[in-house]
Every structure is written in structure tokens, then in C-alpha cells.
Image (tube, coloured by chain):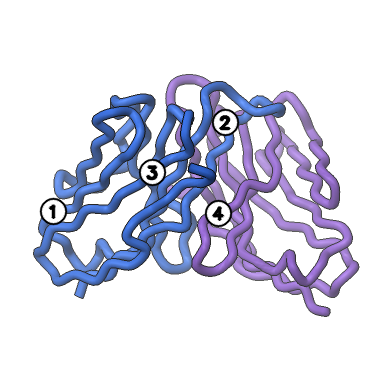
Chain colours: A blue, B purple
């Protein structure tokens, strides 16, 4: 697609429920990232995929959080037994192989999925 | 431990003047830096980047300066326009291994017409 697509854009759930958030990256982008942004904070790294495998999952806060990318394209972030503190905007980003003109690996973000846990 | 810091939560500037947004970092292994702009209800949008082998990178109205010895970078916008009003984030990463970026907490820029 033209951009990074995230669904749902808004999700309201009750404490203890299970939630899935989906990310459809830009076609051809091999790297995919999940970030979480709480109110008044910057995006906080959760996990990064290179192809189908999680290259770095050091940001996942605990074992209630899990992400998959089975075919190297669409990714799903799964949150079990949601807690009120999980309420945030979950951002997905993708990037193309290699680096941009300055040498930096530029991330293109989706609009995010706003999760509210009541 | 906040490795990337944006100590000014907000900034107001008159239209046509220069906006200067600052960012400090603590990890000397960071060598790629990006600036992003974010409007409400949208994802962050990439603006400009710089690598540690440079001290300046310019793209139109946007210039990023890097002072490695001070572990400080700044984004200059000149002339500032009302459409520049947004939250600006700096982000940093190291070159080896992971491509993950660490983001600052953001600075809200308001350009007054």
C-alpha cells in the first residue's frame, strides 16, 4: 500500500480482555517496528522485525505482550489480560532495506491504534 | 534512564522567525539522528536526519546541527510558518546491530501568525 496502515484506529476494551492490533507495512519494506506512545511522552520502542523474525524485542514490557509477523509483511501485536496502564497509542512503522541518503534508516509511521482499557 | 532528552516541552515563535528545537543524548554510541513532526491523531512524519560523521544537514527550511562533543543536536526552522505548528521529536540509534530508535519526549511548537 501507499502508507503504513493500522487497524483498528480506536479500541476500547475492559481490563483483563485480550486485544489484537494489526499493522500492514509499506510494500517491500522488510523491517517493521512497534512503538507505544503514552500521553505527553515520546514513542517508546517495543519490538522490531526484520522479515519474519523478531530482531529485537527488548522493549516488550512483560510476557502479556507478544507480536508476530508470520509472512514477513503484516504484523499483529497481541496483548493478553489488558491492564489500565496499557492504555496508549500503539504505533507501527516500517522501513526499506538499507539506509537513506544520510545513512540513516528512516522509519515511516502509521497513524496508530489508540487503545483504551477501562 | 532517558537516553534522549528534549528539555523544552513547548516553544512559541512568531511567523517568519527562526524556531530552534533542542535535543540532548547520553549514549555516545548513537550515530544516526532523526527528527520527526507529529500532528494530532496522525503518526510521526520524518523531517530530516543526520549521521555522526556530519555536523550539519540542510533540507529547505530545515537544518539540523550536531555537536558530538556536547552530545547535542538542534533543529532550525527558518522561516517558521503556522503549518509548522506540531510536536517535534528527535530520535537516535546506533549503527551496529539493532535499528531501533530511541525517541525524546517531544517539543510542542506553536507558530503564531
**Residue found 76% across the figure and 44% down from its top:** B64
Tags 1 and 3 both on a single chain? yes
Q: Quadrant of the C terminus of chain A?
A: bottom left
Distance in Å between CA atoms under marks 2 and 4 = 15 Å
Q: Chain of mark 3?
A: A
Distance in Å between CA atoms under marks 1 and 4 = 27 Å
Q: Secondary structure at mark 3?
A: strand
User: Looking at the image, is mark 1 or mark 3 nearer the viewer?
Assistant: 3
Comes first in the chain, label 2 or label 3 = 3
Q: Determine which residue is flagged by label 1.
A: A80
Q: Position of residue B10 (x, y in %)?
A: 65, 70
Q: Determine which residue is flagged by label 4.
A: B44
Residues packed near mark 2 inside 10 Å, few (<14), some (14 to 19) or many (20 plus): many
Can you tell which mark lies on residue A105? Answer: 2
Q: Position of residue B109 (x, y in %)?
A: 69, 68
Foreground: A59 or A52? Answer: A52
Q: Chain of mark 2?
A: A
- Specify whether residue B47 is in view: yes
Comes first in the chain, label 1 or label 3 = 3
Circles 2 and 4: CB distance less than 8 Å?
Answer: no
Left/right of residue A87 with respect to residue A1 in the rendered view: left
Amino acid at each position: 500500500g501507499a502508507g503504513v496502515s493500522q487497524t483498528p484506529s480506536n479500541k476500547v476494551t475492559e481490563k483483563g480482555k485480550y486485544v489484537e492490533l494489526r499493522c500492514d507495512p509499506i510494500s517491500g519494506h522488510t523491517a517493521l517496528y512497534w512503538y507505544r506512545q503514552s500521553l505527553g511522552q515520546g514513542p517508546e520502542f517495543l519490538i522490531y522485525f526484520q522479515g519474519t523474525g523478531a530482531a529485537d524485542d527488548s522493549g516488550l514490557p512483560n510476557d502479556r505482550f507478544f507480536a508476530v509477523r508470520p509472512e514477513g509483511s503484516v504484523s499483529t501485536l497481541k496483548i493478553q489480560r489488558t491492564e489500565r496502564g496499557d492504555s496508549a497509542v500503539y504505533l507501527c512503522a516500517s522501513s526499506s532495506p538499507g539506509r537513506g541518503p544520510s545513512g540513516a534508516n528512516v522509519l515511516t509511521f502509521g497513524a496508530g491504534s489508540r487503545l483504551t482499557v477501562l | 534512564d532517558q537516553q534522549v532528552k528534549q528539555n523544552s516541552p513547548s516553544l512559541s515563535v512568531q511567523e517568519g522567525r527562526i524556531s530552534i528545537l533542542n535535543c540532548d543524548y547520553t549514549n555516545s554510541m548513537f550515530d544516526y539522528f532523526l527528527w520527526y513532526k507529529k500532528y494530532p491523531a496522525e503518526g510521526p512524519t520524518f523531517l530530516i536526519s543526520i549521521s555522526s560523521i556530519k555536523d550539519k544537514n540542510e533540507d529547505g527550511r530545515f537544518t539540523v546541527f550536531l555537536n558530538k562533543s556536547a552530545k547535542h543536536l538542534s533543529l532550525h526552522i527558518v522561516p517558521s510558518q503556522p503549518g509548522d505548528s506540531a510536536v517535534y521529536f528527535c530520535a537516535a540509534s546506533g549503527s551496529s546491530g539493532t535499528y531501533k530508535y530511541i525517541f525524546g519526549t517531544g517539543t510542542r511548537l506553536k507558530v503564531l501568525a
